[in-house]
Image: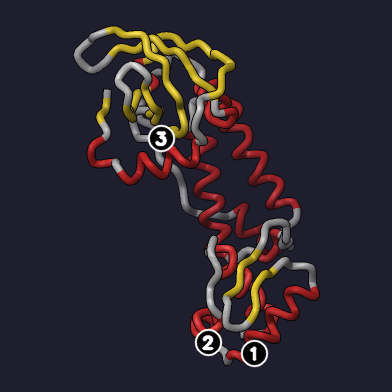
Amino acid sequence: MSRTERLLDLLQILRRHRSPITGPALAAELGVSLRTLYRDVATLRGQGARVDGEPGLGYLLRPGFMLPPLMFSVEELEALVLGSRWVARRSDDRSLSAAARDALAKIAAVLPDDLRREVDAATLLVGPEAPHIDHVDSAQVREAIRREQKLVIAYQDADGRRTKRTIWPFAIGFFERARVVVAWCETRRGYRHFRLDRVGRLERTGTRYPRGRGEMLAEWRRGLDTTDTN
């Protein structure tokens, strides 16, 4: 492995960790000595990477250091192409589909010729979509999630019961036959799952809900086995 490749690998390892990782653990994963690791950390810092920490305490990469996208491996490019194609073909939201195609075009535009050809010739394909019909615009739900705002929805459950709910949406699950909003429901006073194809109408309130979406997502994950589907 060249030193450049090793530095890139070190950056990727640091990016995966949100808490400090010790020098010995980094050295072991890279297969190098501690002395080499310390030199590599110093090199990254010299190139502008904000690597906090020191020997004995661990290291943490702060946000803001960018790598040129041409450093993708072939496997990474295949993953990006497949994911972008899935979103472009399977999303019922035109803006999300267009964003996926635009993102892939931007990546391809800055790649060297050999990697650009890999993108053009990618053979991982997305199959036909199972039909589903949503009656509301999922872009409005995604915006409410980004802004951490409440929604009022008219909902019909699997048994045909119609209710009006005020929800705090914080995630959307994309499944083969449905899009599912994960939210805190004020009516049920708990986390619930709402299929978008059963939402007859939604109203944006412009009111922020009192908790952060990241906090709710973590709490929902911890209690996933007890969360009901409406």
Marks 2/3: CA distance?
39 Å
Is residue 179 visible to the viewer in this orientation of the structure? no
Q: Left or right: where does residue 105 sit relative to residue 195?
A: right
Q: CA distance from mark 1 to mark 3?
A: 44 Å
Whether the residues at callouts 1 and 3 have beta carbons within 8 Å, the answer is no
Q: CA distance from mark 2 to mark 1?
A: 10 Å
Residue matched to label 3: 174
Residue occupied by mark 2: 31
Helix, strand or loop at mark 1: helix
Q: Mark 2 or mark 1: name the one nearer the start of the chain.
A: 2
**Tag 3 or tag 2, which sits nearer the N-term?**
2
- Indicate which label's residue lies in the foreground, 1 or 3: 1
Q: Is residue 68 left or right of residue 85?
A: right
Location of mark 1 (residue): 36
Q: Residue at x 69, y 59 (%)?
A: 69
Q: Amino acid at mark 3?
A: Phe
Q: Is residue 44 left or right of residue 227?
A: right
| Amino acid at the residue labelled 2 | Gly
Label disc, if present, on residue 142 of the rendered structure: none
Q: Secondary structure at mark 3?
A: strand
What residue lies at 54% left-to-right and 61% top-to-bottom?
Answer: 18
Q: Quadrant of residue 153?
A: top left
Q: In the image, what residue type sits under mark 1?
A: Thr
Report the residue at 40% width, 40% height from top.
127
The reply to whether residue 151 is in sight is yes
Along the polypeptide, which appears first: circle 1 or circle 3? 1
Looking at the picture, does residue 108 appear above or below residue 103?
A: below
